Structure formats: structure tokens, C-alpha cells
Image (cartoon, rainbow, N blue to C red):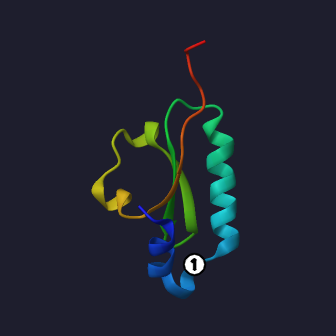
């Protein structure tokens, strides 16, 4: 998926500061999670970060709003 297509679809509502804040939050959370972190568009906040572990498999409605992903960095393999 190309993030630029989803951002372009958001039009003038795309708020770069909210995107950077959500992406920073996703990166910070990824160090403490086994699950992928997703940055999604949101009508109220602009962008939000969600943990795949909170939702299991993300519903289709949420997958359609995904802008970026950050893999979980916590691992039991040494």
C-alpha cells in the first residue's frame, strides 16, 4: 500500500503534525510490543496509533484507514 495515496485522499484535512505525533507514538510503543503498530486516519484527531494486539486482526474498516505500519520490536528469540 502506498501511504501517499491515502494521504492524498484525506485532502486538506491531512495534518502533518498529527501524523508525526502518531508515528512517533507508534515507534515508541513498538519497543514494548510483540504486535504491529498502525497509524490510521481519524476524523477527530487527524491520525491515531493503534496496537494490533488490542484488536486482534484489524477489521476491514480500520484496515482501509491505515497510513503506515511499525513492526513490533519485542521478541522472545535470543
Please identify the residue farthest to the front as the structure is shown: 2
In the displayed structure image, the side of residue 4 where residue 27 appears, left or right: right
The quadrant the C terminus occupies is: top right
Q: Position of residue 12 (x, y in %)?
A: 56, 87
Residue shown at the point (52%, 29%) measured from the top left: 34
In this view, 35 is above or below 58: above
In the displayed structure image, the side of residue 77 where residue 66 appears, left or right: left
Please identify the residue farthest to the top as the structure is shown: 78
Can see residue 43? no
Quarter-wise, where is residue 33 in the image? Answer: top right
Residue shown at the point (69%, 60%) measured from the top left: 21
In this view, 11 is above or below 47: below
The quadrant the N terminus occupies is: bottom left
Residue at image mark 1: 14
Residue shown at the point (57%, 69%) measured from the top left: 45
In this view, 37 is above or below 21: above
Could you say whether the residue bearing mark 1 is in a helix, strand or loop?
Answer: loop
Q: Position of residue 43 (x, y in %)?
A: 48, 73
Between 40 and 5, the one lying in front of the other is: 5
Amino acid at each position: 500500500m502506498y501511504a501517499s495515496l491515502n494521504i492524498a485522499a484525506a485532502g486538506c484535512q491531512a495534518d502533518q503534525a498529527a501524523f508525526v505525533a502518531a508515528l512517533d507514538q507508534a515507534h515508541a510503543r513498538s519497543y514494548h510490543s510483540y504486535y504491529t503498530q498502525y497509524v490510521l486516519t481519524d476524523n477527530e484527531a487527524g491520525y491515531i496509533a493503534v496496537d494490533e494486539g488490542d484488536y486482534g486482526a484489524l477489521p476491514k474498516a480500520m484496515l482501509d484507514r491505515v497510513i503506515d505500519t511499525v513492526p513490533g520490536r519485542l521478541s522472545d528469540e535470543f
